[in-house]
């Protein structure tokens, strides 16, 4: 959607993308802040992976915006793609670490 609608005026799908991306990023930043402040008690390794992935994603998003300002298409695509990969990838890796570190079985009996 980002690449297809790039350079076009705001269409309804771009607005939906913007709202969902902002909400998703905001929630993940909030989780990272609460973890860093000690209000959430994820195990250190999975919490650290999550916080690092959110920081990396925000850095990537910023670099993407700077690439647009500098009219550097290749850098824009690289940094924007990295932003898309680091948010869900970091959350997924943190969840996998949580499940590996958990004393609870992943699947309950009968599943």
Image (cartoon, rainbow, N blue to C red):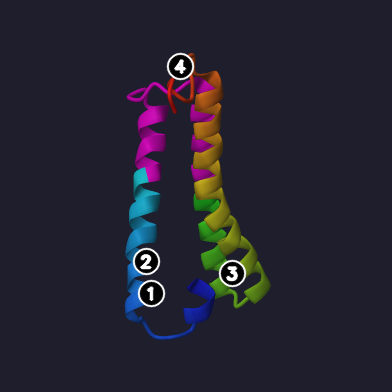
In this view, which residue lies farthest toward the right?
Answer: 74
Circle 3 crowding by C-alpha within 10 Å: few under 14, some 14–19, many from 20:
some
SS category of the residue bearing label 1: helix
Q: Are marks 3 and 4 in contact (CB under 8 Å)?
A: no
Disc 2 versus disc 3: nearer the observer: 2
The answer to whether residue 41 is above or below residue 50 is above
Disc 3 versus disc 4: nearer the observer: 4
Question: Which comes before the other along the chain, label 1 or label 3?
Answer: 1
Which residue is identified by label 2?
18
Which residue is identified by label 4?
104
**Residue 56: x percent and y percent?**
56, 46
Which residue is identified by label 3?
67
Foreground of the two, 68 or 80: 80
Alpha-carbon span between mark 2 and mark 3: 18 Å
Q: Are marks 1 and 3 in contact (CB under 8 Å)?
A: no
Which residue is identified by label 1?
14
SS category of the residue bearing label 3: helix
Residue drawn at point x = 64 percent, y = 74 percent: 72
The answer to whether residue 31 is above or below residue 70 is above
Alpha-carbon span between mark 1 and mark 4: 42 Å
Disc 2 versus disc 4: nearer the observer: 4
SS category of the residue bearing label 2: helix
In this view, which residue lies farthest toward the front?
Answer: 110
């Amino acid at each position: 959607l980002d690449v297809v609608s790039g350079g076009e005026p705001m269409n309804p799908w771009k607005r939906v993308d913007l709202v969902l991306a902002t909400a998703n990023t905001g929630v993940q930043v909030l989780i990272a802040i609460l973890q860093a402040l000690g209000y959430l008690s994820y195990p250190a390794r999975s919490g650290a992976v999550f916080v690092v992935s959110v920081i990396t994603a925000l850095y990537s998003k910023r670099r993407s915006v700077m690439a647009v300002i500098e009219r550097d298409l290749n850098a824009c695509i690289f940094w924007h793609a990295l932003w898309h990969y680091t948010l869900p990838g970091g959350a997924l890796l943190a969840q996998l670490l949580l499940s590996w570190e958990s004393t609870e079985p992943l699947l309950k009996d009968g599943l």
